[in-house]
Image (cartoon, grey):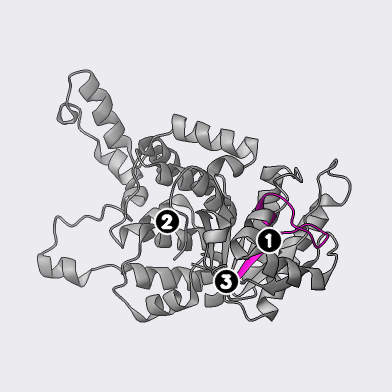
């Protein structure tokens, strides 16, 4: 998975490069900076850091990683938050951009970041997260590297208040039946009527669904409930529909995107994507299948159809499913923003 969000102490993470939120002067600071010095070996790291000298805000330099599980420490100086009008955002963008490109220049295959400047520098955590995700997204669209965003605890990881409120409200207010009703129109008419009748001690057979109703709604039902009643087993097997892999690549062709764009937008590793293309009976994990749906910007019915070909269903009692449905219904297809929300709510993030 090219991009990951994990909860950990960054000094315990294994990566080719560990990013340090450094003091601009060659001294041991506080917070993450102090923890990295302690884990790497204070005297060794400080001696090499002193050779670099001062580092300007937004810039990045590197040293050996010494006792860390890494090859390099990339030192970048974040902005101290004043008012938001003192170039703080531009400096923070530069921290991520310069660190990522320095890692690429050093030949790193993986890099681990803390949320830069959100400690004593006071950068608002929700805005810092959006900047981190934007720069990581931009970089991974052009380069192959594993990028890990390391969060010490979920309290230090904040989405925008608006997004949190909307997701919570959506989870509280919606069930999958309501979502299906909204998306498919009358697709779920029979189920709704049956539930209502049962609550009154009745049964659907007492009030049959008319042929006119069925004909009017046939276009909604056909993709999901084909009429197999008049078919023999041989005929049903002859009419077997596409596998997940076959349907996926038809959707990719229809999207007009090339393979590289799709797997990058889906947060899928290139080698994994190659295996999928070569394996007609490939069975994806749920988070992988949904990642492709997000990359292709599928609507809800098309996504559910694609997932059903791998035997994957959505449930009204599953928080992961409701979060994904919230984003699709609101036409938000930024996989980095979606993954941040999934992580915040303790759910697996999308990709493979």
Q: Position of residue 297 (x, y in %)?
A: 53, 58
Q: Mark 2 or mark 3, which has the lower sequence index?
A: 3
Q: Which residues are magenta?
A: 17-33
Q: Residue at x 14, y 62 (%)?
A: 231
Task: Point out the image quarter for the C terminus.
Answer: bottom left
Q: What mark, if any, has residue 70 been given in the picture?
A: 3
Marks 2 and 1, Cα distance to the nearest angstrom? 40 Å
Please identify the quarter of the rendering in which residue 306 is found. bottom left
Categorize mark 3 by other alpha carbons within 10 Å: few (<14), some (14-19), many (20+).
many
Q: Earlier in the sequence, mark 1 or mark 3?
A: 1
Q: Nearer the viewer, mark 2 or mark 3?
A: 3
Dot 2 or dot 1: first in sequence order is 1
As for residue 18 lying within the magenta part, the answer is yes
Residue of label 1: 20
Q: Position of residue 222 (x, y in %)?
A: 31, 54
Residue 301: x and y, percent? 41, 52
Residue drawn at point x = 24 percent, y = 35 percent? 209
Q: Image point 68% across, 70% down: which residue?
A: 44
């Amino acid at each position: 998975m090219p991009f990951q969000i994990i909860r950990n102490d960054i000094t315990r993470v294994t990566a080719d490069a560990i990013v340090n939120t450094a003091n601009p002067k060659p001294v041991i600071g506080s917070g993450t900076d102090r923890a990295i010095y302690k884990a790497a070996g204070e005297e060794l790291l400080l001696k090499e850091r002193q050779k670099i000298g001062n580092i300007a805000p937004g810039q990045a330099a590197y040293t050996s990683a010494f006792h860390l599980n890494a090859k390099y420490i990339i030192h970048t100086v974040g902005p101290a938050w004043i008012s938001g009008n003192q170039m703080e955002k531009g400096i923070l963008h530069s921290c991520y951009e310069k660190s990522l490109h320095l890692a690429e220049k050093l030949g790193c295959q993986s890099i681990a970041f803390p949320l830069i400047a959100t400690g004593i520098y006071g950068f608002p955590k929700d805005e810092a997260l959006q900047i981190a995700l934007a720069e990581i997204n931009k970089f991974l669209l052009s380069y192959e590297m594993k990028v890990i965003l390391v969060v010490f605890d979920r309290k230090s990881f904040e989405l925008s208040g608006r997004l949190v409120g909307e997701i919570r409200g959506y989870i509280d207010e919606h069930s999958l039946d309501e979502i299906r009703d909204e998306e498919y129109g009358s697709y779920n008419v029979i189920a709704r009527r049956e539930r209502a009748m049962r609550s009154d001690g009745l049964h659907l057979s007492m009030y049959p669904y008319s042929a006119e109703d069925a004909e009017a709604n046939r276009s909604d039902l056909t993709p999901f409930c084909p009429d197999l009643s008049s078919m023999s087993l041989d005929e049903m097997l002859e009419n077997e529909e596409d596998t997940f892999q076959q349907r996926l690549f038809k959707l990719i062709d229809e999207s007009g995107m090339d393979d590289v764009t799709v797997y990058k937008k889906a947060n899928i590793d290139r080698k994994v994507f190659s295996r999928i293309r070569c394996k007609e009976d490939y069975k994806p994990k749920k988070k992988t299948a949904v990642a492709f749906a997000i990359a292709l910007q599928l609507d809800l019915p098309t996504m559910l159809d694609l997932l059903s070909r791998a035997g994957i269903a959505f449930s009204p009692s599953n928080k992961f499913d409701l979060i994904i449905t919230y984003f699709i219904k609101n036409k938000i297809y930024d996989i980095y923003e979606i993954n941040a929300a999934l992580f915040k709510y303790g759910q697996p993030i999308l990709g493979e």
